[in-house]
Amino acid sequence: MNILLVYPEFPDTFWSFKHALKFIRKRAGAPPLGLLTVAAMLPKSWNLRLIDLNIEKLKQDDLDWANYVMISAMIVQRDSATQLVERCKKAGVKMIAGGPLFTMEYSHFPDIDYFVLNEAELTLPPFLEDLEKGCARRIYRSAKFPDIRQTPMPLWHLAKLKYYVTVSVQFSRGCPFGCDFCNVTSLLGHRPRTKSADQMIGELDSLYQAGWRGGVFFVDDNFICNKQQLKTQLLPALINWRKDKTGMPFNTEVSINLADDPELVNLMTEAGFDTIFVGIETPNEDSLAECNKSQNRGRDLLDSVRFLHESGLQVQGGFIVGFDSDTPDIFDQQISFIQKSGIVTAMVGLLQAPTGTRLFERMEKEGRLVTHDMSGSNTDGSTNIIPKMGLDKLLEGYHQLLRQIYSPKYYYARVLTFLRQCPLPKIKYHLDFQYFLALWRSIIRLGLLGAERLQFWKMFFWTLLRRPRLFPLAITLSIYGYHFRKIAYSVAR
Ligand code: SF4
């Protein structure tokens, strides 16, 4: 049996880093973890090939070779997935689809032959069994949540790792919190499930043995969902594993209450974590109460961010405007917070209501739901609800906010605030040819040709003279800034 695993293309979004990739010889962010994991669950005798449309083209020969095409996609990949389905249909090859896009929108894809939805650990085995017997149903779903200690190691060898900036792994699924706009708990549950420390070490070791030295993204919904297990098992194991290694810095997603636990923060930085994404959402207490963001309430959010920065964890922040409780000055409040915090990577989006969330139910009840479909991009200025302040007012404030925080003056001010707070790195970075290429291209594109020339050179020399060991990070952030500005300015024309 020949199986072609195909990953649709990402559009040009905040997290695609497409404009930043031009500075290095890389083609995409990370290989498709879901497909590589599903590949490991297929019968060993099957022949497997992976085509990631983010790094290569799909050829007719590939389709001719395949008995089945397996597609996995997120909502943001909808357009490319739709084109792919059309192409497979034309080629007469049967399709099997799974992942978040199809789990939420399978009814929009009548041409797909089989859907293996929700978590594949539960739905793939019965599908494979039925397929073998020749009696496969069209849809396989499950309301249960599997034990991921049984999940096999992703088949990294199927991916052309040299074309990626980072690699994704996953330690846990689910989140104990209940933010009303978030569909993580309806898709993956409230009770966090984790892999074992041995599984994670095995996955990281196989990557290291394969020569991987770039970043590793733990794509957990909330990495600190089981603090005890992290402190007693995973993090000590990672610290031990890292002793004789260079490179492979880790980043992940956490809730802000990490700042209340200095012991956990210290273990994470010792283990090699240097960047975390945190859903800050808003400095407006009423809006935090409205969306049930209990972990963010009643705390000095600026203080929490400063503590994390000073401990060696760069905070990337998620922010939302458009809550019912937002007052007209919310845009200025957000700008002021983001600037003071030194959060360089600030992803600001409009409030949206994904299906399966409490916000979705409320909006439907109040007759404020415009569509069930969302774009899947957090920063394209789209929303599927009618905001209380009115869409025009919301968009006007949002565009102004984006233009301001990603203007060179504001962006580089945050970079300098962060570099002043940030301690020297604990892990040994692997500076290879890519880094020197990025340095050279940043000098040309940003220092000589860019609108940010002045701010770039100020940061360049400040870092070289005051914090030289942070220089590679400073150059990376200046390149990210170029990408974010392109995205922000394209949304807020
Ligand atoms: S903390 Fe994050 S993952 Fe958890 S429910 Fe809230 S938004 Fe979702």
Image (cartoon, rainbow, N blue to C red):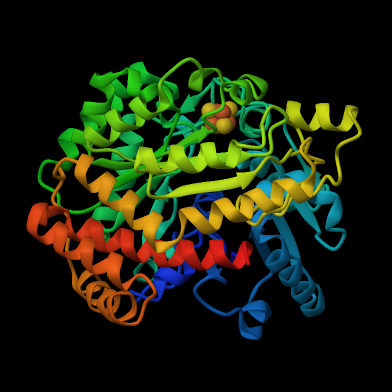
Give the camera-side residue of 336 and 128. Answer: 336
The image quarter containing residue 425 is top left
Q: Say which residue appears at 16% left-offset and 40% top-offset.
A: 423
Q: Position of residue 76 (x, y in %)?
A: 65, 56
Q: Along the line of sight, which residue is nearer the eye, 170 or 457?
A: 457
Q: Position of residue 297 (x, y in %)?
A: 51, 18
How many labels were placed on the picture?
Answer: 0
**With respect to residue 485, does 226 lie above or below?**
above
As drawn, is 159 to the left or to the right of 370?
Answer: left
Left or right of residue 481: residue 290: right
State the image quarter where residue 362 is shown.
top right
Residue 423 visible in the picture: yes
Quarter of the image for the C terminus: give it: bottom right
Residue at x 34%, y 38% (from the top left corner): 200
Which quadrant of the rendered structure holds the N terminus?
bottom right
Question: Is residue 8 visible from the viewing direction of this image?
Answer: no
Nearest the viewer among 449 and 346 is: 449
Residue drawn at 45 percent across, 61 percent down: 407
Compared to residue 204, the image places residue 144 above or below, namely: above
Q: Which quarter of the picture shows residue 77?
A: bottom right
Q: How far from the left and from the top, in percent, is residue 92? A: 80, 75
Ligand 1 shows up in which quadrant of the image?
top right
